[in-house]
Amino acid sequence: MESCLKELQERIAARYRMTAENADQLNSDYLRHLYRFGRTSRFRANETLFDAIITGVNDYGMLEMTTLCGEQKVFGFKEVNFSANHQQNHAAL
C-alpha cells in the first residue's frame, strides 16, 4: 500500500511540475482526451440545437466551437451540452 501511495505522490508531483513548466503540453494532453474533440456533434444551448465541432478550450476554460456554417461560438461551464440523440443523428452520415 505504501509503495502505491509513493508512486501516486511521485506521479502527481511530476504532473504538477509539467503544468508549471509546459502549459502547452498539458493543454495538448487535455484536448487529446476531450470527448468528441474535432468531431461533428449535435449540441444544445439556450434550447437551440446545432451541429458543431469542438475546436479547443480558451485560457478562461471556455469551450470553443465552430458550427457547420463556420460561426465561432464560445461557451462557459454548463452553457452547452450534447444533444441526447447526437449519436443517432450522425450515425446516418
Image (cartoon, rainbow, N blue to C red):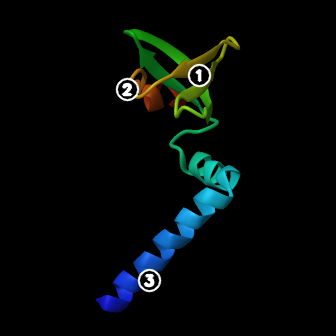
- Location of residue 57 by image quarter: top right
Tag nearer the camera, 3 or 2: 3
Report which residue position mark 2 lands on: 78
Q: Secondary structure at mark 1?
A: strand
**In front of the other: 61 or 50:** 61
Q: Position of residue 90 (x, y in %)?
A: 53, 28
- Location of residue 36 by image quarter: top right
Tag nearer the camera, 2 or 1: 2
- Location of residue 58 by image quarter: top right
Report which residue position mark 3 lands on: 7
Q: Position of residue 40 (x, y in %)?
A: 60, 29
- Above or below residue 49? Residue 85 is below
Residue 61 visible in the shown view:
yes
Report which residue position mark 1 lands on: 52
Q: Secondary structure at mark 2?
A: loop
Q: Position of residue 1 (x, y in %)?
A: 29, 89
N-terminal-most mark, 2 or 1 = 1
Label 2 vs label 1: CA separation? 16 Å
Q: Secondary structure at mark 3?
A: helix
